[in-house]
Amino acid sequence: MSSIVHRPIGTPTRLGIVAVSVILWWLAYGHLTGFADALLALTGLDRGTHLGEALHFFLYDTPKVLLLLTGVVFVMGVIQTYFAPERTRALLSGHRAGVGNVLAASLGVVTPFCSCSAVPLFIGFLSAGIPLGITLSFLIAAPMVNEVALVLLFGLFGWRVAALYLVLGLAVAIVAGLVIGRLGMERHLEDWVQAILNGQKAQWQGDTMDTSQRIAAGTSHVRTIVGKVWPYVLVGIGLGALIHGYVPEDFLATFMGRDVWWAVPAATLLGVPMYTNAAGIIPVVQALIGKGAALGTVLAFMMSVIALSAPEMLILRKALKPPLIATFVGVVASGILLVGTLFNLIL
């Protein structure tokens, strides 16, 4: 009886697999809308209905977030084999307090992700040994300060208002990351995340790895992280799809069209259970402004929807324990309230 000998996969073979995977990933990511349209057509539903719009949202966002999660985690898994965790941490922490937070928040501004799409990068940064506070600055800035909102504000109110939004949004991301970083809440990361972080120091052998081993490390990274997070992604996006398809804009416009002292806190609270990206929230923002709502109130609502959405919290729950999620929400919500109030006072 002969035994099967498993030969190790060589570097050329692994590189070929990676090249084919990248091409397939790029093709899939570039045709997400067509994919969602085709699947929706098979159901016989139309996007003009609440159920059809909700299902289309789910069919589009689920592969989008999973593709991003897989791609980012693989790349970060390969990159971390070149940098010892201590070296990465020192590089992004900066020589002075806050430098890393500024860099991370700035990266978030030029990264066109909604909150759920930013989560893969957040998890990848953590797994690469980047400090928690710095990764949170990125996670906050990526959805909160986005090019769509900047263009809208520039077109409606001019460059001064757009610049004020940019500066205040960056300030919220930087300060929130600094505050949470100073609180030393790494112990409130889930155990599997802590195991990755703690295991890097003992297991890191990047100096002796060849290309094949680095690719294998990236693949292992995907199995470890994506394998744990994907159910939360499905639940989170499912909730977001229901909200996206069934919450009427007229209700929001009526509720928030009152220029009273409690409008900003109410707008912030109302935005948390919802989920959409910047492009999806623009029609709502325009409707609210058209109804006479104060600009600060509208911005607080928009920031809350895209930076503190309930689906995002569900996905983050797999990596963060409740005390850290509560602290994250509390600090960011405080910053959003401040931004909204300042806009209402200034404008």
Image: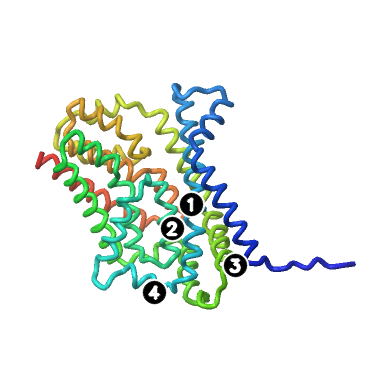
- In the picture, the disc for residue 212 is 3
Residue 293 lies in what quarter of the image?
A: top left
**Location of mark 4 (residue):** 87
**Location of mark 1 (residue):** 69
Percent x, y for residue 143?
A: 33, 47
Asked whether the beta carbons under mark 1 and mark 2 sit within 8 Å of each other, the answer is yes
Residue 12 appears left or right of 137: right
Task: Tell me which numbered mark, 1 or 2, is placed earlier along the sequence.
Answer: 1
Kindly identify the amino acid type of the residue bearing the numbered disc 4: Arg
Q: Residues within 10 Å of mark 1 (few under 14, many from 20)?
A: many
Kindly identify the amino acid type of the residue bearing the numbered disc 2: Ile
Asked whether the beta carbons under mark 3 and mark 1 sit within 8 Å of each other, the answer is no
Residue at 44 percent across and 33 percent down: it is 242
Question: Which residue is at the front of the view, 195 or 291?
Answer: 291
Asked whether the beta carbons under mark 4 and mark 2 sit within 8 Å of each other, the answer is no
Percent x, y for residue 126?
A: 42, 62
Question: Which residue is at the front of the view, 119 or 37?
Answer: 37
- In the picture, the disc for residue 123 is 2
Number of disc labels: 4
Disc 1 from disc 2: Cα separation: 9 Å
